[in-house]
Image (spheres, rainbow, N blue to C red):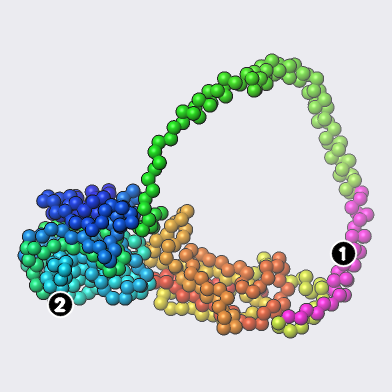
Amino acid sequence: MPLHDAIMALSPIHYWPFATAAGDLSAPDIVGTLPFSSLVNDGGGISGPEMGTTSQRLFSDQIWTTPALNANAFVASTWLALVSQPATGAQSSYVDFLGWGDPNNRTARGWRIEMRSSTTPSASYQMAGFYNVTGVRGAVWPELGWHLVWWQYNAGATSFGLQTDGQVMSFTSAQLTVNPINSDQLWLQSSAPIAIAHMAAFNYQLSTTQIQTITSQIVHWPLQVPVNMPITAGSGTVDLTPVLDGNAQILNNQSTYMPQIGDIDTKVPTILNNQGVFMPQITDIQPRVPIIQQDTHNIVNNLFPQLEVPLNDLTQGVQNILNGITATLDGVGGAITQTIGQIFSGKTLDTLTEADLGTVCFPDTLSSVQPMGGSPFGLALTVTAHPDWYIFTGPGEYYSQQVLFILDIARGGTSVLHQGVHTLTHLIYPMPGIPNFPIYGGLPIDPGDYVITVTPNAEVCVSVKVLTFP
């Protein structure tokens, strides 16, 4: 179901969808004050977490606030906000983006939610305004874009819990620094980029199962429209009337431009009547075909035995030429002296065999030195294990959004190939620096050794095999 329906099904006391306005869909209506209009340049109307929906982007000089909430004590409650933040590691310290208290003096009373992205990719959240609150909550997979940040307060147990997405809530003993007063407001502002699509409050503690009825509806693949781009609406209906009129005119003009169609009825009987003239000649061909086959057979049997001796002599003569001419090749590995016959009698690529370098699993790294000069020609890599939370996309779910492993091939201390691999199987063929000839003569084109390094991503195992000549 849509996210709006999933949230409303849990009976919130306040709900701000942020889709088209700042209004509260619950009663009593507490309308937040947006510092901007719905124009895209002001932050409104950007792409939301569902196709066809929008959200609000807040800039550092803009703040969203509600009127006074008329509450001076905390009771058992659940709050949630569906937000999107960059996971690029650009913000090294925690910054406020949501709170309940005095928006002009945020540390005086109430609580605040803070966010951070210290490394790439990462997204984490923490609570501020409580004593003894520890435990930062990180997003399960930060590159999904949208995350449900939800928190609960248990007044009876004096405990607080903060969680992301559909994870099980864990509570920590907590005590507010100073309780809010009746004039305190709910506010939303961030010095780092953030977008918000939904925010709601409940006067009871939601279970993890109830929260998952919301998080299960969040799309787990990147939308075609980034969150900072406007949604382009359709241009209106399409009028097909001129096309239909043109078709009618074409049909009416058929007798003028295509008279041959109407004349077919009179010509088909003539063709059928002439069948008796042509068919006897066609029938006469059938007995002649075996005679032609026998004549051809006799020619082959009489001619090819006579050609056998000259052909054998020619073959031996060519072989003698190839074995008699010697060529000297100067390369980086030194001078190589071989006959032309030896050069062109190299191993064909269908003689390649596999040499198993082993299987490496996170957090280990596989590093192997392969000597150059005749044996390694390719590299075959296969992902043998990966966690089920890795996300695949594309036709047949073939392409992983996240990098499965890093492959680095170096030679002489210099990396000649460094890439992140997104597919379960990967083939390097031929190795960097080897010419793509149909045969391989075993010439030491480059005397340097290969250093192959495979670094798996989290919970990934990779099997590595090198393709070599026997």
Residue at 44 percent across and 62 percent down: it is 400
Residue at 46 percent across and 60 percent down: it is 399
Read off the residue under disc 2. Answer: 132
Q: Is residue 459 left or right of residue 328?
A: left
Name the one closer to the observer, 461 or 334.
334
Residue at 40 percent across and 41 percent down: it is 235
Label 1 SS? helix
Question: Mark 1 packing: few (<14 Cα in 10 Å), some, or many (20+)?
Answer: few
Read off the residue under disc 1. Answer: 315
- Is residue 340 in the magenta section? no
The residues colored magenta run 302-331
Name the one closer to the observer, 441 or 251.
251
In the displayed structure, 458 sits above or below 213; it is below
Q: Could you tell me the amino acid type at mark 1?
A: Thr
Residue 187 rendering spot, x and y as whole percentages: 18, 63
Residue at 67 percent across and 77 percent down: it is 374
Q: Is residue 218 left or right of residue 15?
A: right
